[in-house]
Image (tube, rainbow, N blue to C red):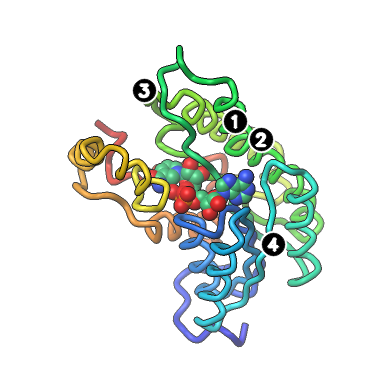
Amino acid sequence: TEHYQGEKTMNGINGTVAIVTGGGSGIGQATAKRFAEEGASVVVNDIDVEGGKETVSAIEADGGEAVFVEGDVTDPEDVAETVATALDTFGGLDFAFNNAGIEGASEPSSDQPLSNWEKVIDINLTGVFLGLREQIPAMLHDGGGAIVNTASIAGLLGFPNLTPYVASKHGVVGLTKTAALEFSAEGVRVNAVCPGVIETPMVERTQEEDPETMEQTIAATPIDRLGQPEEIASAVVWLCSEDASFVTGESLVVDGGYSVQ
Ligand code: NAD
């Protein structure tokens, strides 16, 4: 597309249309920007209007193309509106990054309030399911595409006191495998990304509450630092690109080595 001035580094992203949920902050914001830098038009979803609009402004200021849709990933009508916006505004849908998520309250399983369990499962797991259900038909109709879901290293490992979060992210890994089995032959690849600890507002909140835990987390990360949102963005856009054309059903760990020990 004409708006892109820089050098594209990934094949098959330029001129496409991508949805990013939770695109108003952290990993979603960095990924929306990277999609745009690679020449995709981006539909930014979030419940946070200020954050979502900030992402769109940053993309436009950089010469890219994006639109914000306020929406809750747990609301099927909002999810449908996000997909409809991609089709109506940009004429199709090639990629979706189902990324909106929350950490939820930190309590041992025995003390987890049911309300916290339900909220975390609803946003992190049901939200991804609703996204897949709406996005896949649109992609099939439009010659195929690729989806990336945000799981976590908590989708592969247990973490004390984070029962609903861990269960939701293990669920995302399973949803990803199943959708990949169902639709890869028809031209929709489905993968997940499993970030380690990434420096975003989500993690900054935990750090404020418990600075000691953060130091321990860094000490437990072989690369010896937190990850940056841009380091997840490049994995996500790569998974969508033609460079990853034989990758599907995969949950790609990007964690500075945290989970190999
Ligand atoms: P963040 O809090 O910076 O961003 C999350 C965004 O999602 C926010 O803008 C928020 O408003 C939005 N959101 C929340 N609920 C929503 C809903 N119901 N509908 C639409 N949008 C909603 O957090 P982040 O660190 O960028 O996290 C993004 C994803 O990455 C989450 O799924 C998170 O679980 C996952 N993750 C983060 C880390 C990390 O260390 N930061 C590690 C592993 C996985």
Identify the image quadrant of residue 222: top left
Q: Amino acid at mark 4?
A: Val
Instruction: Say whether residue 194 is visible.
Output: no
What is the C-alpha distance between the residues marked 4 and 2? 19 Å
What is the C-alpha distance between the residues marked 2 and 1? 6 Å
Pointers 2 and 3 in contact (C-beta within 8 Å): no
Which mark identifies residue 126? 2
The location of residue 207, given as percent across then percent down, is 30, 43
Q: Earlier in the sequence, mark 1 or mark 4?
A: 4
Pointers 1 and 4 in contact (C-beta within 8 Å): no
Q: Earlier in the sequence, mark 3 or mark 4?
A: 4
Mark 3 = which residue? 160
Q: Is residue 65 above or below residue 165?
A: below
Viewer-proximal residue among 110 and 127: 110
Q: Secondary structure at mark 1?
A: helix
Viewer-proximal residue among 86 and 123: 123
Q: Earlier in the sequence, mark 3 or mark 1?
A: 1
| Disc 1 C-beta below 8 A from ligand 1 | no
User: At x 75% / y 60%, what residue is drawn?
Assistant: 143
Pointers 3 and 1 in contact (C-beta within 8 Å): no
Mark 4 = which residue? 69
Mark 1 = which residue? 121
**Quadrant assignment for the N terminus:** bottom right
Viewer-proximal residue among 181 and 209: 209
What is the C-alpha distance between the residues marked 3 and 1? 17 Å
